Amino acid sequence: MKDPLAPNAFRKNIAIEPAISGDEEQLLGLYSLVYEKHYPIALGTDPAIMSALIKSENCLWLVARDLSAGRIVASTVF
């Protein structure tokens, strides 16, 4: 049986890490691409709210970065 956690070309180019200040533009682009203008809460559409949440100690915003392309390809907020 193939090990599902074995390295592969896709997985080795993706890093899961906390969002940082400066990620807001890419996050806005990602949310716009996926949801168009229909994301129901401001954290996906308002760069000031994104920035505040990224800097907040009460929030964890994780992003998946495609290291080969240098872009954010997914995100989640806790």
Image: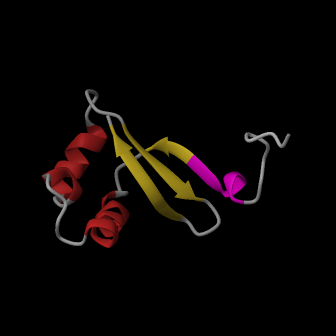
Query: Which colour assignment does the render follow?
Result: secondary structure
Which of the 4 image quadrants contains residue 25? bottom left
- Tell me: residue 41, above or below residue 28: above
Name which quarter of the figure residue 23 lies in: bottom left
Please provide percent x and percent y for residue 47.
Answer: 20, 58
Give the residue at x 75% y 59%: 9
Q: Quick one: which residue is furthest to the top in this view? A: 58
Q: For the N terminus, give its image quadrant.
A: top right
Residue 59 lies left or right of residue 72; in this view the side is: left
| Residue occupying image coordinates x 40% and y 46% | 19
Q: Residue at x 35, y 34 (%)?
A: 60
**Residue, far front:** 1
Quarter-of-image position of residue 61: top left
Q: In the image shown, does 69 or 37 lie closer to the viewer?
A: 37
Q: Is residue 16 above or below residue 60?
A: below
Whether residue 52 sits left or right of residue 1 in the image: it is left
- Where residue 51 appears, as percent x and y from the top left, is 24, 49
Magenta segment: does it hold 77? no
Q: In the picture, which quadrant includes the C terminus?
A: top left
Residue in the picture at 30% in, 63% down: 31
Q: Is residue 71 left or right of residue 37?
A: right
Q: Nearer the viewer, residue 3 or 76?
A: 3
Q: Which residues are magenta?
A: 10-15
Percent x, y for residue 63?
A: 45, 49
**Residue furthest toward the right?**
1
